[in-house]
Image (cartoon, grey):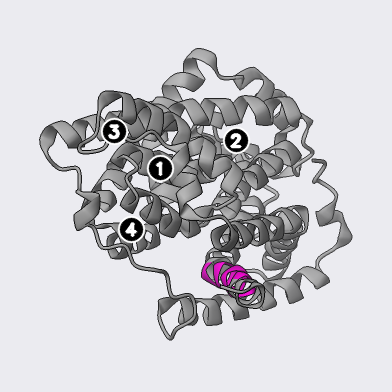
Amino acid sequence: MDLVSMAGDTLYTIAGMGWKMLWALVLGFAISGAVQAFVPKRRMAQVMGDDGPASLARAGFFGAISSSCSYAAAAMSRSVFLRGAHVTAALAFMIAATNLVVELGFVLWSLMGWQFVVAEFVGGVVLIAIMALLMKAFGPIAAFERVRASESDDQADDAGDVPSPLSLDGWRTAAARFAMDWSMIWKDIVIGIVVAGTIAVWVPQSFWQAVFLSSGDGVSWLQMIENALVGPLVAVVSFVCSVGNVPMAAALFNGGISFGGALAFIYGDLIVIPMLLVYRRYYGTKLAAQLGVLLYVAMVLTGFLIDVVFTLAGWAPDAAATGVGSMEFFKLDYTFWLNLVFGVVGLGLWYLSRQAPAAHCAHHGH
């Protein structure tokens, strides 16, 4: 392949990744803006105000139905945290919003088979549980509370000063929050998409396959451990996030990477470098680093445990028998119609944000 063709493929892949993510980004940031504008802190504290099983279950449910990409999930997680949710519940919300969503299941089924769909959703629940245990044992919960206390996120709404979702002024406020979330991290999103598209075209799959230990026929315990350890790290440096990491995971699995290693790679979308930069902007450098390490450990343990269970039960798929296709970015499918609808929604919110009082923009300090 000549340089001109590779450059064209790179631009196509970058545009395709952005196209696939567009509707989810708009939906995620719209929900984030609505949560910030309409949900009183005291209500969020009632629903997700602790790190108990019921609170985590509710956080997981709300995250799953939010159907967002990782960037939007991070924004929504921060929103519910600032509105009174326990930090562990907010993180459970973020994990669910990226690993328990319907569109991810569709992509996994088409590229990697039903076993990966089941493993992804079961593993998402396990990932939340392990994260919660790690947060309770080692998490910097007090430091997160100090971050929340330092935010001037419209404390007046605790006294009942929350706009109605039926009022135009309320939606102007929500639109202003929508626009501010975009303005805070759009550069990180663009960088992530550009780097991911470039790597997908220019870095051969043989390079990634060489990074993972292979035991030839079958999968050894050592390979399970090493692949689970390396999977999220490869995701970190690949910059591939959200649903966009599934095609790469499929190619890696087809090349001999273990079942758990491929799963751990998919989970790694929450600790890719652009996401770590988003955490840094939201919570500061130290907390972003601690959060990244904690999520990494949870991903490794989850990938390994799911690999062991599925292998022992005989459910782990055979890579040779798994059809690995390629994602066709631009076609007349659900993505087209959702982008059309949410493109209009996004433009409408952006227009409303221009009418919002400037005071609404004063609360973001990270």
In the depicted view, which residue is nearer to us: 93 or 4? 4
Q: Earlier in the sequence, mark 3 or mark 2?
A: 2
Outermost residue toward the bottom? Answer: 332
- Amino acid residing under circle 3: Ser
The span from disc 3 to disc 2 (Cα, nearest Å) is: 48 Å
Sequence order check, earlier mark of 4 and 2: 2
Residue 16 covered by magenta stretch: yes
Q: Secondary structure at mark 2?
A: loop
The residue positioned 85% from the left and 63% from the top of the image is 357
Determine whether, in the image, residue 360 is placed left or right of residue 175: right
Q: Residue at x 48, y 46 (%)?
A: 208
* Residue 215 numbered tag: 3
Q: Earlier in the sequence, mark 3 or mark 1?
A: 1
- Residue type at mark 1 is Gly
Q: Is residue 352 left or right of residue 117?
A: right
Q: Which numbered circle lies on residue 240?
A: none
> Which label number is shown at residue 84?
2
- Foreground tag (4 vs 3): 3
For the residue pair 42 and 255, the one nearer the viewer reads as 255
**What is the span of residues highlighted in magenta in the rendered image?**
10-20
Instruction: Please state the horizontal and vertical placement of residue 127, each as a whole percent of the image.
Output: 39, 34
| Amino acid type at mark 4 | Leu
Left or right, 320 with reference to 366: left
Q: For mark 4, what is the residue?
A: 108
* Image position of 187 with respect to 156: above or below: below
Q: Is residue 101 above or below residue 366?
A: below
How far apart are labels 4 and 2 at the CA level?
34 Å
In space, the residues marked 4 and 1 are separated at their CA atoms by 20 Å
- Let me know if residue 54 appears in the view: no
Image disc number at residue 60 = 1
